Image (tube, grey):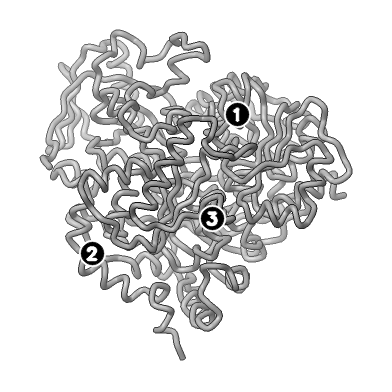
C-alpha cells in the first residue's frame, strides 16, 4: 500500500469520516462547475429544498456549449441558450461566483482554474468533467465526478470516495526538440493502455516532468483519465510556486511564503512507497499520433500502423473496428495521411505556450487549400495575451480562423463539428467514434505543433524536421 | 431507501472492450437540462445512421426489448464523466450491468443511481453473452446476498462487486447526501484545519 506520497498526505488531510459503506468522506477544497453537468444537480438541490454548504468554494464558468464565432445573446442554438440561462439562474440563486463572458475571465474550466490561481497544491478539487485530472499538475487530488456527485459537493462540500492505489511513472532524460508534453502523455497511455490506470492515481516523476513548465504538466495530467487513472499529479516545486505568484485567487503576498511552506509539506517524501512503479527514458519518446478510436491506439510519427494479425484477440477486435472507422490500412505509415481539418484547442492544449508553439510552425506559411484550420484559445485571458503577442495575426495570415474561448471541437457541443467522414488533426484528448460531432468523423490526436504542421502540409508530417 | 437483494430479468449483450461514454450517449444529447429524455438515446449513433435509419444493434432488436441486465466486456464506460450515460441506460430499462471491468467514474455514477455493476471473469462473461445471444428469453437472476448470477438450467457464477458499491446497493445507501450531511460538525472541523482555508496561519513563523 502506498505510503507518504502526495496522494496519501492530501487524502488524509481531507478525510472527514469513514462511512458505513467503507468509503471515506472526503472534504473538497474547490468545486468547479460548468453549464453541462450542473443544471440537474441544482434541480436535485432545489427539489429537496437543500442549501449549498460552502457557496464561496464553488466557481462557475461556461465552456462546453459556447459558440466560438459569434457570442451575442440569445445564442442561435436554443438548447445552448437554455443551458446558459440555467447556469445564470442557479449561480444567482445560490450566490456562486460566475466567471462569465463579461468578467473577461471565462474559459475552459480546467484552463481558468489554474490561470486564476484557484488551483493550488494540497487541495482536493472536484468538477463534473473527467478532465479535472488536469489540476493535478499543481500537486492536487482532482476528481472528475458525475452530476449526482455534483449535488453532493454542492450540498455537503464532500464526496464519498474509495481510496486509490498509487503508481509512480518515472521518466528521466531530456525530450528531443519537437517532442512535447502531449507526446509524453500519449506515450504513457500507449505503454500502459487505456485501462491500465483503473484503480490508480498516477504520480508523474523524474527529470522530464520536473523540467516541464506548468502548462506542460497540465497537458500530461489532463490525459491521466485517458489511461484509466481518475487522478494524475506532479509534486509541487519552485516552478509551481512561481506560476502561482500574483494570480487573482492565489494567496496574497503577505501569506505567500507561509503557503509555500505548506505546499512543500504535501509533496511525496523521498522515502515514499508506491503500489507500483514504471520507468522509461525520454529518448524512447518521439512525436505520437493516434490512428484509432481510443487514445491508446497510437504510433510514433515515423512508425507504420500496427498489424491486427499480430495482436492479442481482444486488441485485434478493437483494432479491426478502428481500421473500419478510420478508413486507414495496417502496415501503412501514418506519415502522409491527408487531413481535412486542423483544430488547435481543448483543455489539453489551448494554453499560451501551445499557441506559441503552433504559431512558430505557422509563421510566414499558408494553410493547405484543402484544410479548414482554426485556433480556439482556452480562455478569454489567453486570447487577449495571444493578441498582445500578435499570434492571432500569424495564424490568420496563414489561413487559420481565430476564435473565442471554449471547448469547441474537442466534443462538438457547439457549432464546431466535423462533417461526414472528415478527418481532423486535433490537439484535443479523445478520438472516440463521433467525438468531434459527426458519427463518421475521424480524429488523429497529436501535439499542437504537429497539428499546425499538418494544417500547412495538408497531411501528417514529422515536426522534428522543422526544428532541424 | 430499500436495498437491492435480488434482480431478475432478461439479458442484452454489448460486445467489445473500451466502449466509451461518447458511444453510450453522443455529446449532442447532453444539451438537455434534465435527464428525463435520456432513455431515447443510448448508443444512438450505433443504432441509427445520420438519416435516422435503424442499424443492426442489440438495442434495436425486437428479441431484446424489455431486457434489463446488460452484459459487457472490459473498461466499459471509459472517457467522459457524463452521468447521462448511466441515466440513458437506466431510463431505457437497464437495471444492472454485468461486465469484465468498468471505468471508475462510470461505475460510481451507476452506483449513485442505484444501478449495480458487477464483475465476472472474461471466460464467464463470454459464456453468458453467448447464452443471451442464443436465447434472449433466458432469465438471469443476480442474487446480491449470495453474490451469484443464476441462469435457468445453467450452473451459477459467483460475481465480484467493489465492497463499498456492494454495501451501498445491498443496504440502499447509494443516495449519499444524507450520509455526508450527517457529519456536518466534522465537515466544519476539517474546514477549520485546512491551511488553505485559514490563511496558512499554522505555517506562520
Instruction: Name the quarter where the N terminus of chain A is drawn.
Output: bottom left
User: Picture coordinates of residue A297 (x, y %)?
Assistant: 59, 34
Residue B192 spot, x, y in % from top left = 31, 75
Q: Residues within 10 Å of mark 3 (few under 14, many from 20)?
A: few
The chain under label 2 reads: A
Q: Residue A178: where, in percent of width, then height?
A: 77, 49
Q: Are marks 3 and 1 on the same chain?
A: yes
Residue A17 image label? 2
Circle 1: is it few (<14), some (14-19), or many (20+) Cα within 10 Å?
many
Q: Chain of mark 1?
A: A
- Return the x and y of residue A53 as percentages of the image width and height: 29, 61
Mark 2 and mark 3 lie on one chain; the one further toward the N terminus is 2
Q: Nearer the viewer, mark 2 or mark 3?
A: 2
Q: Residue at x 36, y 42 (%)?
A: A39
Front residue of A122/A378: it is A378
| Residue A401 located left or right of residue A434 | right
Q: Spatial distance from mark 3 to mark 1, Cα to Cα?
A: 38 Å
Query: Do the residues indicated by labels 1 and 2 lie within the same chain of the protein?
Result: yes
Q: Name the N-terminal-most of marks 1 and 2.
A: 2
Spatial CA span between label 2 and label 3: 33 Å
Q: Residue A278, labelled with which disc?
A: 3
Residue A288: in sight, yes or no?
Answer: no
Which residue is denoted by mark 1 in the rendering? Answer: A417
Of circles 1 and 2, the one toward us is 1
Amino acid at each position: 500500500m502506498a505510503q507518504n506520497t502526495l496522494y496519501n498526505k492530501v487524502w488524509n488531510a481531507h478525510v472527514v469520516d469513514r462511512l458505513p459503506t467503507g468509503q471515506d468522506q472526503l472534504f473538497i477544497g474547490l468545486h468547479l462547475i460548468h453549464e453541462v453537468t450542473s443544471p440537474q444537480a441544482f434541480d436535485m438541490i432545489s427539489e429537496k429544498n437543500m442549501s449549498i454548504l460552502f457557496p464561496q468554494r464553488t466557481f462557475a464558468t461556461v465552456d462546453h456549449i459556447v459558440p466560438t464565432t459569434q457570442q451575442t445573446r440569445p445564442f442561435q442554438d436554443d438548447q445552448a441558450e437554455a443551458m446558459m440561462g440555467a447556469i445564470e439562474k442557479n449561480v444567482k440563486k445560490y450566490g456562486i461566483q460566475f466567471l462569465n463572458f463579461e468578467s473577461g475571465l471565462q474559459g475552459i474550466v480546467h484552463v481558468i482554474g489554474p490561470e486564476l490561481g484557484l488551483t493550488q497544491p494540497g487541495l482536493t478539487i472536484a468538477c463534473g468533467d473527467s478532465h479535472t485530472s488536469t489540476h493535478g499538475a499543481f500537486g492536487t487530488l482532482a476528481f472528475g465526478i458525475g452530476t449526482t456527485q455534483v449535488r453532493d459537493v454542492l450540498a455537503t462540500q464532500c464526496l464519498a470516495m474509495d481510496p486509490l492505489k498509487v503508481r509512480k511513472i518515472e521518466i528521466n532524460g531530456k525530450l528531443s526538440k519537437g517532442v512535447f508534453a502531449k507526446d509524453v502523455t500519449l506515450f504513457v497511455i500507449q505503454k500502459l493502455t487505456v485501462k491500465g490506470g483503473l484503480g490508480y492515481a498516477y504520480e508523474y516523476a523524474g527529470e522530464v516532468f520536473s523540467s516541464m513548465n506548468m502548462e506542460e504538466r497540465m497537458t500530461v495530467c489532463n490525459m491521466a483519465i485517458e489511461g484509466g487513472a481518475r487522478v494524475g499529479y506532479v509534486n509541487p516545486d519552485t516552478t509551481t510556486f512561481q506560476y502561482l505568484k500574483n494570480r487573482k485567487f492565489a494567496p496574497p503576498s503577505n501569506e505567500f511564503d507561509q503557503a509555500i511552506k505548506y505546499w512543500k509539506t504535501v509533496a511525496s517524501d523521498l522515502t515514499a512507497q508506491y503500489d507500483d512503479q514504471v520507468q522509461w527514458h525520454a529518448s524512447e519518446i518521439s512525436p505520437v499520433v493516434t490512428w484509432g478510436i481510443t487514445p491508446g491506439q497510437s504510433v510514433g510519427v515515423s512508425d507504420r500502423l500496427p498489424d491486427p494479425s499480430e495482436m492479442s484477440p481482444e486488441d485485434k477486435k478493437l483494432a479491426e473496428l478502428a481500421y473500419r472507422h478510420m478508413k486507414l490500412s495496417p502496415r501503412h505509415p501514418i506519415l502522409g495521411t491527408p487531413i481535412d481539418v486542423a483544430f488547435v484547442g481543448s483543455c489539453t492544449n489551448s494554453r499560451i505556450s501551445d499557441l506559441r508553439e503552433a504559431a512558430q510552425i505557422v509563421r510566414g506559411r499558408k494553410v493547405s487549400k484543402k484544410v479548414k484550420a482554426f485556433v480556439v484559445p482556452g480562455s478569454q485571458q489567453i486570447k487577449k495575451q495571444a493578441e498582445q503577442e500578435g499570434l492571432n495575426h500569424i495564424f490568420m495570415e496563414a489561413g487559420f480562423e481565430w476564435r473565442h474561448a471554449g471547448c469547441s471541437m474537442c466534443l462538438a457541443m457547439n457549432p464546431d463539428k466535423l462533417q461526414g467522414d472528415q478527418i481532423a488533426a486535433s490537439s484535443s484528448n479523445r478520438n472516440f467514434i463521433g467525438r468531434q460531432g459527426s458519427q463518421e468523423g475521424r480524429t488523429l490526436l497529436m501535439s499542437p505543433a504537429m497539428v499546425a504542421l499538418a494544417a500547412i502540409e495538408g497531411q501528417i508530417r514529422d515536426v522534428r524536421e522543422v526544428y532541424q | 431507501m430499500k436495498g437491492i437483494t435480488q434482480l431478475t430479468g432478461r439479458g442484452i449483450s454489448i460486445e467489445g472492450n473500451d466502449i466509451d461514454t461518447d458511444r453510450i450517449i453522443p455529446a449532442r444529447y447532453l444539451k438537455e437540462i434534465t435527464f428525463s429524455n435520456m432513455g431515447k438515446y443510448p448508443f444512438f449513433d450505433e443504432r441509427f445512421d445520420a438519416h435516422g435509419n435503424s442499424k443492426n444493434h442489440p438495442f434495436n432488436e425486437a428479441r431484446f426489448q424489455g431486457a434489463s441486465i446488460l452484459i459487457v466486456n472490459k473498461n466499459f464506460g471509459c472517457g467522459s464523466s457524463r452521468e447521462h450515460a448511466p441515466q440513458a441506460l437506466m431510463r431505457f430499462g437497464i437495471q444492472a450491468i454485468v461486465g469484465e471491468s468498468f471505468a471508475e467514474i462510470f461505475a460510481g455514477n451507476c452506483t449513485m443511481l442505484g444501478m449495480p455493476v458487477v464483475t465476472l471473469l472474461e471466460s464467464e462473461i463470454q459464456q453468458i453473452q453467448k447464452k443471451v445471444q442464443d436465447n434472449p428469453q433466458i432469465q438471469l437472476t443476480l442474487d446480491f446476498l449470495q453474490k451469484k448470477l443464476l441462469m435457468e438450467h445453467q450452473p451459477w457464477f459467483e460475481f465480484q462487486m467493489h465492497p463499498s458499491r456492494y454495501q451501498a446497493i445491498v443496504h440502499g445507501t447509494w443516495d449519499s447526501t444524507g450520509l455526508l450531511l450527517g457529519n456536518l460538525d466534522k465537515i466544519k472541523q476539517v474546514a477549520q484545519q485546512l491551511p488553505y482555508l485559514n490563511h496558512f496561519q499554522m505555517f506562520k513563523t
